C-alpha cells in the first residue's frame, strides 16, 4: 500500500477566506494522477472520514486532469484568527492527508 505523500509532489492547505480551508494535491505526472484516481481510495467519503466532517462540510471534491491535481475545501469550525483557532493560516490542515492510502 502506498500513501498519498509517497505519490504526490505537493500536498498543501491554506485559507480560502475566514471560514474555509482549501486543499491541493498535485501529482508529478499524469500516470501517477490517473493511478490514484483509478484506485478509488482517495474519495470524497474517505476525506470526510479522515477529517471527521459531514458531506455538507466538504465543499467540492474534484480531480483536475489538466493539472494532475485534486482540490477540495472544508468549512472551518471557527473563523481564521478567531477564538479557539489553532491554525490562523490553515497551512497545517493537510497533515491528515499525508498517510492516506492512495494505491493498493
Image: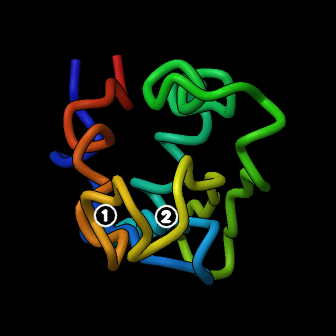
- The image shows residue 60 at horizontal and vertical percentages of 78, 55
Please give the residue where the numbered disc 1 appears in the rendered image.
Answer: 11
Q: CA distance from mark 1 to mark 2?
A: 7 Å
Locate residue 40: give its quadrant: top right
Q: Are marks 1 and 2 in contact (CB under 8 Å)?
A: yes
- Helix or strand or loop: what does disc 1 sit on? strand
- The image shows residue 37 at horizontal and vertical percentages of 59, 41
Whichever of callouts 1 and 2 sits on the residue coming sooner in the sequence is 1
What residue lies at 54% left-to-right and 66% top-to-bottom? 79
- Name the residue furthest left: 6
Which label sits in the foreground, 1 or 2?
2
- The image shows residue 13 at horizontal and vertical percentages of 38, 68
| Mark 1 neighbour density, 10 Å: few (under 14) some (14–19) many (20 or more) | some
Locate residue 22: give its quadrant: bottom right
Q: Quadrant of the C terminus?
A: top left
- Name the residue furthest right: 56
Residue 14 shown left or right of residue 48 in the figure? left
Q: Nearer the viewer, residue 93 or 10?
A: 93
- The total number of labels drawn is 2
| Mark 2 neighbour density, 10 Å: few (under 14) some (14–19) many (20 or more) | many
- The image shows residue 94 at horizontal and vertical percentages of 32, 54
Please give the residue where the numbered disc 2 appears in the rendered image.
Answer: 23
Amino acid at each position: 500500500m502506498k500513501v498519498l505523500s509517497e505519490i504526490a509532489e505537493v500536498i498543501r492547505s491554506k485559507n480560502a477566506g475566514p471560514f474555509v480551508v482549501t486543499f491541493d494535491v498535485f501529482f508529478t505526472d499524469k500516470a501517477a494522477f490517473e493511478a490514484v484516481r483509478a484506485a478509488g481510495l482517495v474519495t470524497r467519503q474517505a476525506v470526510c472520514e479522515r477529517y471527521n466532517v459531514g458531506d455538507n462540510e466538504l465543499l467540492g471534491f474534484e480531480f483536475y486532469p489538466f493539472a494532475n491535481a485534486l482540490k477540495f475545501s472544508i468549512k472551518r469550525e471557527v473563523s481564521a484568527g478567531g477564538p479557539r483557532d489553532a491554525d490562523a493560516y490553515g497551512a497545517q490542515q493537510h497533515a491528515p492527508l499525508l498517510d492516506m492510502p492512495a494505491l493498493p
